[in-house]
Amino acid sequence: QTASLYYSDEPDGIRDRAQRQGKVLSFNNILDMDAAVFALSAWPRRPACVIIKHTTPCGLAVGGSAHDAYQRALATDPLSAFGGVVAFNTVVDEATASAMADQFVEVVVAPAFHAEALAVFKPKKNMRVIELPLHEDRGLDFKRIRGGMLVQERLRVQLVSDGWTVPTKRQPTEQEWLDLRFAWGAVAAVKSNAIVLARDEAAIGIGAGQMSRVDAVQLALEKCRAQEHDPAGAVLASDAFFPFRDAVDAAAAAGVNAIIQPGGSVRDAEVLAAADELGIAMALTGTRQFRH
């Protein structure tokens, strides 16, 4: 199914894309591209890569280069990455393109591609290669409903920690703070209920779209272990508050050291007491990041 595209007057939308090769973009391809651009918006100044399946990340990492970020994002869940949309916030060079050569990829998105990278992609005739500016979208978010439309400002992912608090006895280490900030940026792009496990500024387990938060934690841990990542010593981000302590208990049992979440539950005191009991540092941001 191909897509009919309707654009706003914004100068930096999907309409400014340049397709370098591949089949016509489908409706779902464009939705996944939009999700990918949003997922990368948290890191405007560092090389980052996201792999999107069904509008939610299955891999996400920052790195020292596009190649490094891709390898780390792919390691999150290489099984789920099959047939995904891979997006970068920096130029794709030959080394990065070559690293993708054996992977089935529907769409590659980046603000620019080296000529050598395009030459690597060229034999894959069906692969859609899209050059797309990755400007921050400050517009509106629209959702069609029966009989009308819902409109609100688009979520902006900001990793500034002004207003964040750490009410637990244990404070995050310097490395844990780096990973907590990364995880907080990553979880905003995951369908709610959303949980992200992270280590060294890369996702190692993602629990998405669950009806209960503890199930999202269990799924993230299951995904983590399935790819032979170790959750012990990792951090965890939750897109909204914990309604009960059960998710904290599950994270602690797996060895998670630090958690970041909005707070705001009527049981916050119980959740924070559980963190103290289990020796977990817990940061509260004061802002939730539901993505429906």
Image: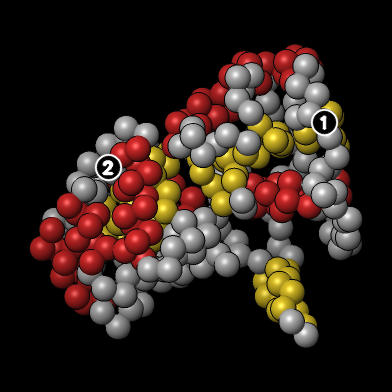
Q: Residue, x 47% and y 56% (percent of image)? A: 208
Q: What is the crowding at mark 2: few (fewer than 14 residues within 10 Å), some, or many (at least 20)?
A: many
The quadrant of the image that shows the C terminus is bottom right
Q: Is residue 197 left or right of residue 67?
A: left
Secondary structure at numbered mark 1 = loop
In the rendered view, tell whether residue 66 sits above or below residue 224. Answer: above
Q: Position of residue 174 (x, y in %)?
A: 29, 43
* Amino acid found under the numbered disc labelled 2: Pro
Q: Residue, x 75% and y 21% (percent of image)? A: 124
Q: Is residue 292 left or right of residue 180?
A: right
Q: Earlier in the sequence, mark 2 or mark 1?
A: 1
Q: Is residue 7 visible?
A: yes
Q: Is residue 250 left or right of residue 45?
A: left
Q: What distance separates the C-alpha of mark 2 from that of mark 1?
A: 39 Å
Q: Position of residue 49 (x, y in %)?
A: 57, 36
Pick the residue in front: 130 or 78: 78
Q: Is residue 174 visible?
A: no
In the rendered view, tell whether residue 160 sits above or below residue 85. Answer: below
Q: Residue, x 88% and y 60% (percent of image)? A: 6
Residue designated by label 1: 22
* Amino acid found under the numbered disc labelled 1: Gly
Residue designated by label 2: 231
